[in-house]
Amino acid sequence: MIEMKNLTKRFEKVTAVDNLSLTVPTGAVMGLVGSNGSGKSTLLRLLAGVFRADGGSIAVDGRELFDNAAVKGECFFVPDFPFFYNNSTVENTAALYRELYPNWSEDAYARSCAVFPIDPKGRIIDMSKGMQRQAALILALSTRPRYLFLDEIFDGLDPVMRHMLKKILIEHVSEQQMTVVIASHNLRELEDLCDRVCLMHCGRVLLERDIDSLRRDFRKVQVAFREVPQVPNLFEGINVVSAWRNGNVFNVTIRGAEEEFMPKLNALRPAYISAMPLTLEEIFISEMGAAGYDANTVR
């Protein structure tokens, strides 16, 4: 389990992570989503021990993370732009990692090399962006990390590779109780993979929930009237996140269970009403809009 308490990281006048508290359960796949500059990549670097926090703490299974070689040996971080030396190959980097990571697995290395179609003897810097990510994943999975941190890992991968990566990660989580934290703007990919999601904005957590309950608690509702009721607040008593009107038709995003808001909507005697669950992307847009970050305010 990873426990972050009052975590803060500043870069001169910019506070990238602002008094953030968050817990990632063992064996969970946590998706980090948020606006550009929300602090996702900084948070991953704090979790990987690349950055030292300016305030607060990070504990991995109750152990302090920063400058703790034993804990870092159980973690692996794949950044948005993986770094390799000019002459690095998968093969010679694997030779180095065998000495650095106590859980290195030759079996996992052989299986990963067989799955990802790249030349382990080829120079990694000569490869495409997607192939460089595959090289980083081969090495990451071969260390058999208990904690895997991935930053925009789907970027540059073709659809077949993205599907295969999700399958591989699910297998590792199931077999080894590996904990994964993934920062990504590709919400559709996260929706298929993650069991929890953390929405960040301005270095803080807007919400953190398991995806199933998140889907249950948000609905997009279309309500149509023959004549719109003449009342001061049409949706009074309903937790409306956003709404827009087109004539007598209202499209409303509502936070709450259907059994709570449907009787109130039916009391308005609409001609038509339909409720559907939101996608993760629609929830993201609604919550960010409620936080003042939407197409009307971003330039």
Image (cartoon, rainbow, N blue to C red):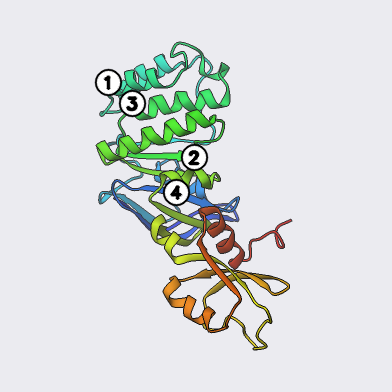
Of tags 1 and 3, which is closer to the observer?
1
Residue at 44 percent across and 53 percent down: it is: 197
Please state the horizontal and vertical placement of residue 273, each as a whole percent of the image.
Answer: 56, 71
Say which quadrant the C terminus sits in: bottom right
Reading the chain from its start, which is encountered first: label 4 or label 1? Answer: 4
Q: Earlier along the polypeptide chain: callout 2 or callout 3?
A: 3
Q: CA distance from mark 1 to mark 3?
A: 8 Å
Q: Secondary structure at mark 3?
A: helix
Residue kind at label 2, given as amino acid type: Asp
Confirm whether residue 174 shows in the render: yes
Question: Dot 4 corresponds to which residue?
Answer: 31
Measured from the top left, where is residue 25 in percent x and y?
Answer: 31, 52
Do labels 3 and 4 touch, CB within 8 Å?
no
In the rendered structure, the answer to whether residue 260 lies left or right of residue 175 reads right
Looking at the rendered structure, the number of numbered marks drawn on it comes to 4
User: What residue is disc 1 on?
Assistant: 107
Q: Which residue corresponds to mark 3?
A: 142
Taking the view exactly as shown, the residue that stands out farthest to the top is: 121
Identity of the amino acid at label 4? Answer: Gly
- Which tag, 1 or 3, sits closer to the chain's start? 1
Label 2 residue SS: strand
- Residue sitting at x 45%, y 59%: 215
Q: Nearer the viewer, residue 70 or 88?
A: 88
Which amino acid lies under the numbered mark 3 shown in the image of this protein?
A: Ser
Splitting the image into 4 quarters, where does residue 108 fall?
top left
The label shown at residue 151 is: 2
Mark positioned earlier in the residue sequence (4 or 2): 4
Tell me the element at label 4.
strand
